[in-house]
């Protein structure tokens, strides 16, 4: 397959080994100008420090760094929170939800700089290649896409380090790396190393955000999260911006060993992979939001929404954040959140999240109904008719089974009463 003619490309750049090597590789193999784009999603200063200098030294003509933490929390994390989406019942989608935002701004930078292509460092085995490229297609299908891992001869970390040395790319990485990690405001993921054996227990020194349950405080900690129309606004008595609210809950959850998940998941490309995730603040938000919904949403809406969140999670995991179905589902979800104002108090103890209280002025839980007169709200005598109708199909099935039995005969129905005159 012939290479596209590329004049200027915007690379999703992290400053790690792979993307540092991609910069000179693009120039060497495509003869194009490279703009390195980095999204600050809360991965930490240690990853962003010296990033511009490193990118320029690698051969990029410019390095663009955007602080997207508030947009990430307000426009991506909180809508996902409102949906209740969890992939395969446990994964809070920390990597999946970040990719469409990075790709969105990649496209914007490409249009600003007049680039004709975008590039990413995702491998040909993983999910991220799909997430990046579906976003490119949704937002600007005219941009060409370069995915070096699907083209180059580099097949290992050792190959990448050798290539970097040959091209004078400044990298501090060694040939020994235990884990592959992805960090942002929402989570920290770990893959590789001993985790490639699903029978092996993760080593404690792998974790970088949260303490172990054994090392968590011996005294429970309480935290209260306040919501307005389904959006978290306050932690305890402090009103915080979206990003700062997540960061505050990360601190609280992490010191109480909250949010560790060890998961064997089904990748979109067809293989299974094992990942260990630390999502302390996200876990607290999901638990609190779910408890508030139990008060405010009626049964049919709540149960339908529970079915919906499985599909919503799949759309995010599969890179379809900008798909019309996800956007239409979001409109429904937003409507369900209009009365979701109130607070939830959580008790945190050695990795456990225990509900300690919940309140909403819009609560459908009405203890006072039980104290009314019999006919004011609920007439118990009417339950018999309801049960007769609700169980009619079961009764008919039972009568049919009895009539087929040689030992037991049911009453034959009297059809004469239905004859017309």
Image (tube, rainbow, N blue to C red):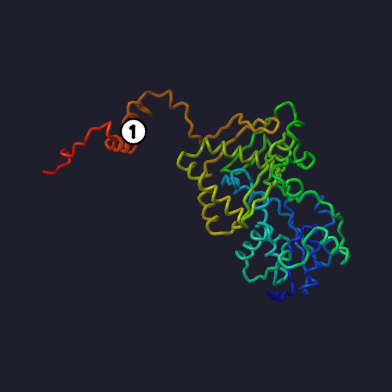
Q: Residue 293's spot in the image, x, y percent?
A: 54, 39
Identify the residue at horizontal 68%, vertical 47% (top origin). Answer: 274
Quarter of the image with the N terminus is bottom right
Horizontal and vertical percent position of residue 121 = 73, 61
Q: Secondary structure at mark 1?
A: helix
Looking at the image, which residue sits at the far left? 421
Furthest toward the front, the residue is 406
Nearest the eye: 270 or 315: 270
* Picture mark count: 1
Left or right placement of residue 390 versus residue 368 in this view: left
Residue at 65 percent of width and 53 percent of height: 96
Residue 382 in the image: x percent, y percent?
32, 29
Q: As displayed, is residue 320 above or below residue 246?
A: below
Foreground residue among 24 and 88: 88
Q: Which residue is mark 1?
A: 386
Other residues around mark 1 within 10 Å, as few (<14) / some (14–19) / many (≥20)? few
In the image, is residue 198 above or below residue 252?
below
Quadrant housing residue 278 = top right
Residue at the image point whose x is 63% and y is 51% from the top? 76
Q: Locate residue 381 relative to residue 133 in the image: left or right.
A: left
Q: Is residue 239 above or below residue 30?
A: above
Q: Position of residue 197 (x, y in %)?
A: 72, 46
Residue placed most toward the observer, 317 or 65? 317
User: Horizontal placement of 137 versus 36: left or right?
Assistant: left
Give me the residue at 71% from left, 41% from top. 250
Q: Which corner quadrant of the image does residue 231 belong to?
A: top right
Q: Is 231 left, or right, of 259 in this rendering?
A: left
Quarter of the figure with the C terminus: top left
Could you say which is closer to the camera, residue 201 or residue 280?
A: 201
């Amino acid at each position: 397959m012939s290479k596209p003619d590329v004049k200027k490309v915007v690379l999703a750049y992290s400053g790690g080994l792979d993307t540092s090597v991609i910069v000179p590789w693009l120039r060497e193999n495509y003869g194009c100008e490279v703009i390195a784009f980095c999204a600050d999603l809360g991965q930490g200063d240690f990853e962003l420090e010296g990033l511009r200098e490193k990118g320029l030294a690698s051969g990029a003509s410019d390095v663009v760094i955007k602080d997207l933490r508030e947009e990430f929390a307000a426009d991506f994390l909180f809508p996902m929170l409102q949906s209740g989406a969890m992939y395969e019942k446990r994964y809070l989608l920390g990597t999946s939800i970040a990719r469409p935002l990075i790709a969105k701004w990649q496209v914007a930078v490409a249009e600003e700089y007049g680039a004709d292509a975008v590039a990413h460092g995702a491998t040909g085995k993983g999910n991220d290649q799909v997430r990046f490229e579906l976003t490119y297609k949704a937002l600007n299908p005219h941009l060409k896409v370069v995915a070096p891992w699907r083209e180059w001869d580099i097949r290992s970390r050792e190959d990448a380090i050798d290539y970097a040395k040959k091209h004078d790319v400044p990298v501090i990485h060694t040939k020994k790396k235990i884990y592959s990690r992805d960090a942002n405001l929402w989570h920290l993921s770990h893959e590789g190393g001993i985790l490639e054996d699903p029978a092996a227990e993760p080593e404690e020194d792998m974790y970088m955000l949260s303490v172990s349950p054994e090392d968590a405080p011996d005294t429970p900690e309480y935290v209260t999260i306040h919501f307005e129309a389904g959006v978290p606004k306050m932690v305890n008595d402090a009103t915080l911006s979206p990003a700062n609210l997540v960061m505050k809950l990360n601190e609280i959850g992490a010191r109480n060993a909250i949010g560790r998940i060890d998961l064997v998941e089904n990748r979109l490309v067809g293989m299974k992979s094992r990942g260990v995730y630390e999502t302390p603040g996200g876990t607290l938000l999901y638990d609190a939001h779910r408890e508030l919904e139990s008060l405010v949403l009626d049964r049919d809406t709540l149960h339908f929404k529970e079915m919906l969140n499985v599909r919503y999670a799949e759309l995010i995991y599969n890179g379809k954040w900008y798909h019309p179905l996800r956007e239409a589902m979001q409109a429904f979800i937003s409507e369900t959140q209009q009365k979701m104002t109130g607070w939830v108090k959580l008790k945190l103890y050695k990795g456990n999240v225990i509900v300690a209280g919940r309140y909403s002025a819009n609560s459908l839980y009405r203890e006072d109904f039980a104290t009314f007169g019999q006919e004011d709200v609920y007439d118990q005598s009417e339950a018999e008719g309801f049960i007769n109708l609700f169980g009619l199909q079961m009764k008919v099935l039972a009568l049919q089974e009895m009539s087929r039995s040689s030992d037991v005969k049911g009453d034959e129905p009297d059809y004469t009463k239905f004859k017309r005159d």
